[in-house]
Image (cartoon, rainbow, N blue to C red):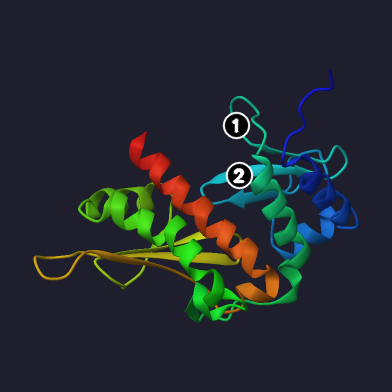
Amino acid sequence: MEPKKSANLEPLRGAWERAAYLNPKHLSETLDLSMVPGTKKPILRVMDKDCSVDFESRTMKYLGPGDQEVPPHLQILALHYLEGAGKAQLANRLVTFRDFEGGAIYYPAFKARTIDVIVKEFGDKPELLRRIGEAMRSELVDLGSVGFKVNFFPRMPVVVVLWLGDEEVPAAANMLFDSNAGKVLPTEDISIMGGALTRRLVKLARA
């Protein structure tokens, strides 16, 4: 009997194939990435963790104890980012998911995976969300009751905002992106990025 194939195996293989032309040295210079000493492996920060990108062995691993492999969906996202990172500079203007191409159509699914989860998990725990933001070395922003900016990748900021509710108005949240993010990643990837960040926030909250 053949072993069961991972659902992410083919997309991941394809992402590595498409990224095969990337030059590690050029990437490090363009994105100001450091390299693993004595290697040709750029170090890419993904949310709050550093990982090494090995184009020769086509592996991506978190730096630190255990040498754990980065999950396939994050590897695919990171490779797409590295491919597109040179296409746009930061606009330093925040927009919602709806503002990206096709974003209005996919917004209900995006909202269910991100904004609704943040409200449910942190709507009555703003200080917990603030502490998680600090633990992720994010930058506080003057938005909402709690607001901070996480660099999901270098030059790929995501802003999380929570507004406290009261007896008349329920708690609310939003997730904002740089307006040029759509020039680097397709809208589907931006949705995946928002979902991944939300899951990371929840995981840290429950740790």
Q: Position of residue 106 (x, y in %)?
A: 55, 69
Q: Amino acid under label 1?
A: Gly
Q: Circle 2 — which element?
A: strand
Residue at 65% of width from left, 28% of height from top?
67
Is residue 195 something one can see in this rendering? yes
Residue at 50% of width from left, 82% of height from top?
93
Residue at 71% of width from left, 42% of height from top?
52
Q: Is residue 14 left or right of residue 166?
A: right
CA–CA distance in space, label 1 to label 2: 9 Å
Residue at 56% of width from left, 62% of height from top?
191
Q: Nearer the viewer, residue 88 or 190?
A: 190
Reading the image, the residue beneath label 2 is 50
Is residue 152 something one can see in this rendering? no
Q: Residues within 10 Å of mark 2 (few under 14, many from 20)?
A: some
Q: Nearer the viewer, residue 76 or 93?
A: 76
Q: Is residue 90 left or right of residue 8?
A: left
Q: Residues within 10 Å of mark 1 (few under 14, many from 20)?
A: few
Q: Position of residue 18 (x, y in %)?
A: 86, 56
Q: Amino acid under label 2?
A: Asp
Q: Position of residue 128 (x, y in %)?
A: 27, 48
Q: Is residue 46 left or right of residue 81?
A: left
Quadrant of the frame with the C terminus: top left
Q: Which of the 4 image quarters holds residue 178?
A: bottom right
* Mark positioned earlier in the residue sequence (1 or 2): 2
Q: Which of the 4 image quarters holds residue 205?
A: top left
Q: Is residue 92 above or below residue 127?
A: below
Q: Is residue 170 left or right of residue 156?
A: left
Q: Which of the 4 image quarters holds residue 51?
A: top right
Residue 64 got which mark? 1
Q: Is residue 173 above or below residue 204?
A: below
Q: Is residue 133 above or below residue 177?
A: above
Q: Circle 1 — which element?
A: loop
